[in-house]
Amino acid sequence: MKRLIVAIVLGLGLLGGSHAAIDAREPADESQRQRYYELSSVLRCPKCQNQNIADSSAPIAQDLRGEIQRMLGEGRSDEQIIEFMVARYGDFVLYDPPLSSHTLLLWFGPAALLLAGGVAVAAIVASRRRSRSGAARPLSDAERRRLAGLLQDPSLSIEQDP
């Protein structure tokens, strides 16, 4: 009997968790619902920074989803909604910001750093090659005479132990 009661309680507990919450802000019209999900997935959450507003549970993301639904209800186009969000939060709210004077570093900075790193590596490799080739150059006449004098100097001889 105890097992039956435990099984019923566990079953009811599992059933309660299986009901998903419905977003109260979700539009009723299918075309608006599609636009709503598309817009909320291409706009970045200002607080979370690495999540779109569809995935974020931050209060600001909830407010932005409400704004999207309100503007869809007013009949605004996707471009108008995105322009409103950019005007309010800046280009940061877009995952793919437009190329402008403010975003030049964002677009070309990584390529410039990669190019600078490649130039630095090439310069290091070239300098090492030059230093290796300089070490293998033949001795001049003056250096040969000095070396021969050093090799004949009895004070520099190495005595071996028997």
Image (spheres, rainbow, N blue to C red):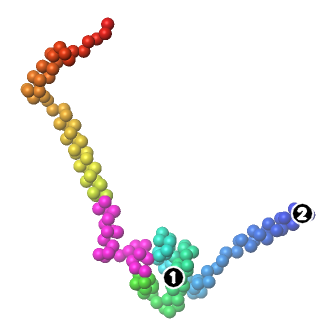
- Which quadrant, please, contains the N terminus? bottom right
Residue 96 in sight from this viewpoint: yes
Q: Horizontal and vertical percent for residue 43?
A: 47, 77
Q: Compare residues 148 and 23 and report the one nearer the observer.
A: 148
**Residues at discs 2 and 1 in contact (Cβ within 8 Å):** no
- Helix, strand or loop status at disc 1: helix
- Which quadrant, please, contains the C terminus? top left
Q: Amino acid at mark 1?
A: Leu
- Would you name the residue on which mark 1 appears? 64
Q: Residue furthest left?
A: 141
Q: Amino acid at mark 2?
A: Lys
Q: Compare residues 160 and 62 and report the one nearer the observer.
A: 160
Please state the extent of the stretch shown in magenta in the rendering: 89-113
Q: Horizontal and vertical percent for residue 146?
A: 11, 23
Q: Horizontal and vertical percent for residue 74?
A: 50, 92
Q: Residues within 10 Å of mark 1 (few under 14, many from 20)?
A: some
Q: Please state if 100 lies on the left or on the right of 149 as rendered.
A: right
Mark found first going from the N terminus, 2 or 1: 2
Identify the residue at horizontal 22%, vertical 41% (top origin).
129
Tell me the quarter of the picture where residue 29 sits: bottom right
- As drawn, 15 above or below 136: below
- As drawn, 27 above or below 5: below
**In magenta stretch: residue 148:** no
**In magenta stretch: residue 103:** yes
Residue 82 in sight from this viewpoint: no
- Would you name the residue on which mark 2 appears? 2
- Helix, strand or loop status at disc 2: helix
Q: Horizontal and vertical percent for residue 128?
A: 24, 42
Q: Residues within 10 Å of mark 2 (few under 14, many from 20)?
A: few
